Amino acid sequence: MERRKLIKLGNSSYAIALPKSWVTKSGLKKGDEVFVIPNSMGELILTQFNKKINEEKKIVINVDNKSEEDINRDISSAYVKGYNLFYFIGKIDRDKSKIIKKGIQYLLSIEVIEENSNNIVAKDFFNMEDNNQESFIRRIDNNIREMFSLIETGYMKEKLSKIELGEINKVDDDINKFYFLSSRIMLKAMDSPALLTSMRTECVELFYRWWLCFNLEQIGDSIKQLATLVSKCGVNSKRFIEILSEIKNQYVNSIEAFYKEDAGVAKNTIVNSFKTKEKLGKIKDNDVSKIITNNLESIRKATYQNAKMVLYLKI
């Protein structure tokens, strides 16, 4: 943080000297226009609207001697950090090409635009100016509700079919796409006043929505793990069905509390969540039951975290 002294200009204005590092980073030069926007927190946002929000950001990823896991990690990391032009270099045979394309398909709006034996070029076509975080959250929410319905069906008939398990895995992939996109937007907006202003939001609200998406992604993963277990081993326990139903209701209440900014509903969800935690803590069975309990607790905890965030910010 740097300190600056106010300089009086005439009878109606004051001025400060802007840090050179910020001016350079923003792509500004002498004579350029900047815009000063007051927000609800008493702060002033200084930005240049003419700066390209979707400016090209290139990264080169060498795939030689890398496993599929390493390549996927490089792709997702670069995507979240805001790169939108991906150059994959190295010895790209048929297997490496499949790995790269598979890694790309798990991210939203990226397509391969060039390919040969030495490199693959992929581009992200998502327009940052058109993003709507709440629509992403609603998309993830709809997916999670669908997953809950499928896993409940599996519990009721004691086993999930391969088709139902495949559907759950497909829905979870969709959740991951929007979670990565939410992370990408948050990091870019935190470093781009122009993007933050175009989104008509503030840093606190931006983080709040990302944190919600983070927990929703955790819920999706845990439901997928439960589904895999039910598909392999089956479940015949009225106790687990009842607890799953409780957690599903708490999930629905927590997300509705977010939509409606209802601290009262969030508070009730937290109270009920602690009661469910006590029930889960009393279960001591075989290894399969332990895995089920751990996944149910993961869903409960993530739901609790979202309800707590609504309570803290909206009380």
Image (cartoon, grey):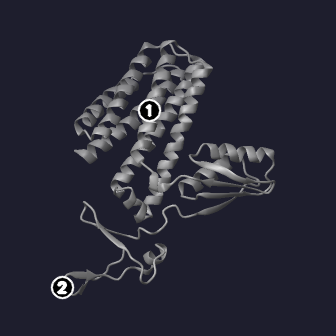
Q: Name the residue under label 1.
A: 142
> In the rendered view, would you say 20 is above or below 160?
below
Is residue 44 in sight in this rendering? no
Q: Name the residue under label 2.
A: 11
> In the rendered view, would you say 135 is above or below 275?
below
The numbered mark at residue 305 is none
Snapshot quadrant of residue 276: top left
Q: Which of 289 and 40 is in front in this view?
A: 40
Amino acid type of the residue tagged 1 in the rendering = Asn
Q: Quadrant of the N terminus?
A: bottom left
Distance between the alpha carbons at the discs numbered 1 and 2: 56 Å
Q: Residue at the spot x=70%, y=48% of the render?
A: 100
Q: Residue at the spot x=60%, y=43% of the render?
A: 106
Query: Is 149 left or right of 17, judged from the image as shown?
Result: right
> In the rendered view, would you say 83 is above or below 103?
below
For this orientation, the residue located farthest to the bottom is 10
